[in-house]
Amino acid sequence: MNNDTSPAVKPAQHKLMRRFVLVDGIAVLFLALVAAVVLAIDALLLLFACVLFAVLLYELSAILCRRFGWNRKLALVAVVLALLLIIGFGGWAMAPQIAEQSTELAQQIPQSLQRLRQMVENQPLLARIAADLPDAKQLIGSMQQFVPNAGIFFGGVLGALGNVVIIVFVGIYFALSPRQYKQGIVKLVPQGKRERAVQVMDDIGDTLARWLIGKSLSMLIVGAATAGGLTLLGVPLGLILGIIAGLLDFIPYIGPIMAGVPAVLIALSISPDLALYTVLLFLGIQTVEGYVLQPLVEARAVEMPPALTIVMQLVFGTLFGFAGIALATPLTAMLMVLVDKLYVEDILGDRPTG
């Protein structure tokens, strides 16, 4: 009896064992992939920053191609040379003033915070708040701890310069031959889905390109308006504070607050009225950006609800640090396109009509 049933039992057992091995293997590979992503997250964020810069270069060169009929590579060379010329000439012309104001800013912030503590301590109702404010030494220590973590891949000031060099050169290589890298990614997709993968990648590229062009113009306007407004108000270090405001405008909502704090502290060290005018200046600039510039950018790119943007900044900031906060908005824009195309349209079947 046993001899008759054993041949039928053994294949079933082997089949069950193969399933267990397959499931365990897939689980191990998935965990290994998650671990690799977690361990290499800094490099992946740096790679995403390179892609963003490449998209910006490609879109600017495409604009030149459409306007003047140039060859795309010639247009890309012209864009890179123009950016190098603008940055090089601007850096050469303003380098002494920027260096001087940067050094003075590092000295002014702790001194201004200390004056704020003294002013608050003179008010009995605000004395408890003063106890929670850090002193100058604590602030300097916090800034020194924050700077190494501000880099995406390497730490410290040299690391930040290394990040810039990597982003520039890798971004240029990506922009020179985007099809080569796109085809490499498409080959990882099953053949029946490759055409759809190309469409989704093109949609992501177009969305990021439109968002970057609009955001770059917004950053330029905010930086110039902040520097000019602070200078007219008589706030010291207007140029460097304007540059900081323009750069931090890349981070919606959180960036303007980070840029406004040092300006208000410096103005407060001169007079409370000047600090109030500085607050009104930042509020006015952000109001214009929020109700004029940002809707124009979103109308041409992707509309992101403010609450979603802030939540994603908190999530990415908690997971990946300052780099996560800085890249949260373009990452969210990319994720929204993926969800819309791959889930809403392909899985749910809710495709746009007309």
Image (tube, grey):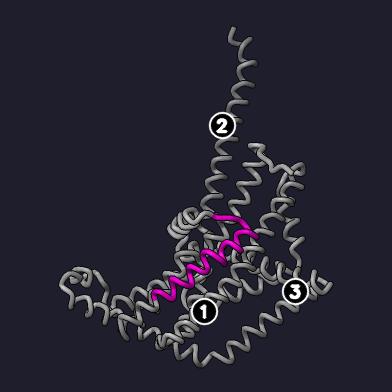
Q: Name the residue at 46% across, 86% down.
A: 231
Numbered badge on residue 20: 2
Specify whether residue 116 is in view. Answer: yes
The residue closer to the viewer here, 162 or 248, is: 248
The residue closer to the viewer here, 128 or 153, is: 128
- Alpha carbon of mark 3 to alpha carbon of mark 2: how far? 53 Å
- Alpha carbon of mark 2 to alpha carbon of mark 1: how far? 64 Å
Q: Is residue 301 magenta?
A: yes
Q: Name the residue at 60% across, 87% down.
A: 90
Look at label 1 and name its amino acid.
Ala
Answer few, some or many: residues within 10 Å of disc 1's Cα (few below 14, many 20 plus, some between 14 and 19). Answer: some
Residue furthest to the left in view is 124
- Alpha carbon of mark 1 to alpha carbon of mark 3: how far? 30 Å
Q: Position of residue 71 (x, y in %)?
A: 83, 72
Q: Position of residue 262 (x, y in %)?
A: 38, 78
Answer few, some or many: residues within 10 Å of disc 2's Cα (few below 14, many 20 plus, some between 14 and 19). Answer: few
Residue under circle 1? 225
- Which quadrant is the C terminus positioned in? top right
Specify whether residue 102 is in view. Answer: no
Range covered by the magenta-colored residues:
279-304
